[in-house]
Every structure is written in C-alpha cells, then in structure tokens.
Image: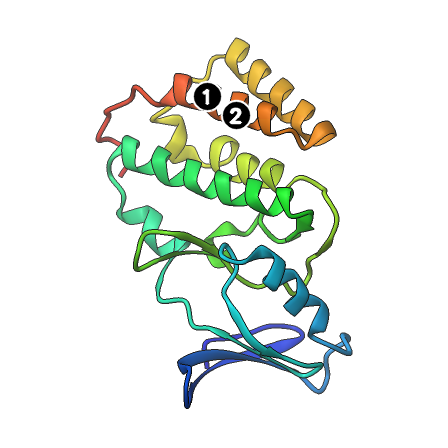
Amino acid sequence: VLGKGHSSVVLAAEFAGIGRAAVKVLRTDSKSSSLLRECDLMRKAFPVAPMTYYCDDEFIVMELVRGVKLGDLVPRINSCRDLITLYLKILASARYLDMKNITHKELNVLREHVIIDVEGRVRIIDFESGFAGFTCNVCRVFSALFVRDPRIMKCCDIRETLKKLLFELLSSYKETNSEHTFASLVKTIIDVCGSSSCECVG
C-alpha cells in the first residue's frame, strides 16, 4: 500500500509489459463515482504528473514515481542555493499546470504532493480534488515556499519594498496567467535570493 485517501487507495503492482506500477483504486465508500476526471487531468499534466497507462471509473494504472517526497527532502538541504533552486523548479512545475489550465487544489500541502524523482525532476501527484480551469497554482506554491517557509527567510533578504513588488507581480499573474509576468516574478525572486551562498538553513 503506497497511500490511502478519502476516496481511494494506491497500491504498488507488477504488470507484464509495464513492470512495476502504481494502481489507484476507488474506495467503495467514496463520495466520488469515478476516477476518469482525475485520469484526464493527469494525462494533460504529464510529465509533471505521473504517466497513466490505463483508466476506468474504478482504477488508474500509472507510473510508479521513484523518488523522495518534498517533506522528507527539504530538511536534508543545508545550502540556500540548493533550496532556492529546488523551490524555483517547483514553482515552474506549478506554472506548467497553469499553462495546461489545470487546478490541482491541494498544493498548499506540498510536502505530500511533490516528489523529486531519481532524475531530479519535480513530479506532482494526487489530482483527486483537481479540476479544469485556472485558479493560480503558482500563487499557492509561492505562498507555501516563499512566504510561509521560515527556512527561506534565512536565505532571502525580502524587504518590504521587494515584498510589495513580488505580491504585485503575483496579483498581476493571477489576473492574466501571463508567461511574461511569471518570468518577471522568477527574475525578482532570483534577484532577491539568488546571490545567497549561505549554508545556514539547517
């Protein structure tokens, strides 16, 4: 058993032709009647989401992502540069979902829903509560990583004037879903945090 949720259970299984895979099974007491919506979102969100092999109302057979959950990885990072680089990669993955017009809805709990795979790529799992539409995944991820994480405050000198600029850019991005505005947001984060070589986030 890889995980249990309100609506489903995720198991590891072996398949001929696929090898080891993850299988999401709809629970009999689930309020949801089908997993097909989640499967459709995952297909659109690949390669950020796991690859799907087979879907029906009760099952999703998908790629078994091998890696480390964000909540287990972050406490091991001691370098500001490594932490900021990782957080920017996660922000870029959230941007990818926004570009695909997908709302994950649970990215405020990044430690459980983000996996860094064995190749160092950011993978986002569990689209169970997601839906088609833009409500700003970038906003949720930015808030979780660059506002609420006390570790990042040791790395980034975010003065009030810069904080105001960041939130203005985020507000503009939320209204427009603009690549240009997102690029400006990332550049500002790098300007504020990117020069840090502090080894003091542990």
Give the x, y percent position of residue 5. 60, 72
Q: Which residue carries the number 2 mark?
A: 183
Q: Residue at x 62, y 58 (%)?
A: 44
Q: Viewer-proximal residue, 48 or 2?
A: 48
- The amino acid type of the residue labelled 1 equals Lys
Check the image and report above or below for 118 versus 146.
below
Left or right: 121, with 124 as reference point? left
Residue 129 image-quadrant placement: bottom right
Residue type pointed to by label 2: Ala
Question: Who's the residue at 30% across and 56% down the image?
Answer: 119
Query: In this orientation, does residue 159 appear?
Result: yes
Q: Residue 30, position in %: x, y?
A: 72, 79
Compared with 41, 64 (above or below) is below
Q: How many marks?
A: 2
Circle 2 Cα neighbour tier, 10 Å, few/some/many (<14 / 14–19 / ≥20): some
SS state under label 2: helix
Residue 116 location (% of width, % of height) = 37, 54
Between residue 18 and residue 97, name the one nearer to us. 18
Q: Is residue 201 visible?
A: no
Residue under numbered circle 1: 187
